[in-house]
Amino acid sequence: MEQVSLRVRSGRKTGSRESRRVRRQGQVPAVVYGPDVSPIPVAVDSHDLHLALHTEAGTNAIINLEIEDGDTLTTMARVIERHPFRNEYRHVDFVTVDLSKKVHAEVALHFEGTPIGVKEGGVFSPRRTHVLIEVLPTEIPAYIELDVSEVEIGGSLRIEDLSELENVVYLEEPDAVVMSVTVPAAEIEEPEPEEVELLEGEELEEGEEPEEGAEEAEGEGEEPESGE
């Protein structure tokens, strides 16, 4: 796993007003903490942060945080708040990690191949794009591949179908569906309602289902109107 270095400015004041001021200066408010580290409010250059989180490791990158007038801490970005409309970060939590101890990480799934069912007219339906694993920080894979080429219409693949990777433990339920190939909605035919005949003089009450085999006799034996 590639490690990146990132300089941060310490001494940032807390509060929403201060955070807005930091953002106007092209920086992102952040905090650093961990099992043996009290929370430290910091600010990081938005461009540098973007580069640090867009290596092959993505948000699972190991970041050596160089704190101004302080120590260098080994961290990972674990709580990342993004702007709802603009492509920018609003706040980041950096959590210190011990490279000799396993951590939890969400890793992207890459679906490889075209399912047989899709070639036959089915619809590819991914149920998840990431999977939660437990692994050493230095051994987090950039992504996990899953071959879907043999999946037929109505078929699916589950967590238990993912490749076994050395030192990687999947934390999801083994029978959780990862992807499936479904029948196109337009091809699902709804059964037509059955026509049921009534016996003479019978009327259906509201919500009542007619009995099977009833014969229509409406109109039989009735006297024609006199026309008066």
Image: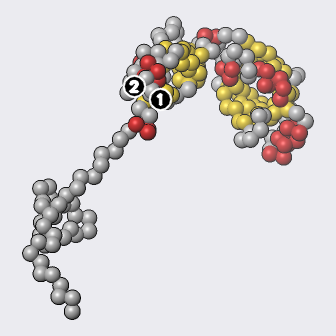
Furthest residue to the top?
Answer: 166
Q: CA distance from mark 2 to mark 1?
A: 8 Å
Q: Amino acid at mark 2?
A: Ile
Looking at the rendered image, the quarter that the N terminus falls into is top right
The residue tagged 1 is: 123
Q: Residue furthest bottom?
A: 228
Element type where label 2 sits in the image: loop
Task: List the residue tagged with mark 2.
Answer: 153
Q: Residue at x 18, y 70 (%)?
A: 203
Residue 188, position as x, y percentages in the image? 38, 39
Which one is earlier in the sequence, the residue at label 2 or at label 1? 1
Quadrant of the image occupied by residue 15: top right
Against 148, residue 18 (above or below) is below
| Residue at image coords 12%, 61% | 215
- Residue type, numbered disc 1: Val
- Name the quadrant of the C terminus: bottom left
Q: Residue visible at 77% across and 38% down?
A: 86
Count neighbours of disc 2 (C-alpha within 10 A) and say few if under 14, some if 14 to 19, many if 20 or more: many
On the image, the x and y values in percent for residue 100 come to 61, 10
**SS for dot 1:** strand
Instruction: Please tell me which residue lies in front, 70 or 103.
Output: 103
Which residue of the protein is positioned furthest toward the right in this rendering? 25
Asked if the residues shown at circle 2 and circle 1 are in contact, with their CB atoms under 8 angstroms apart, the answer is no
Which x, y percent locates residue 85?
74, 41
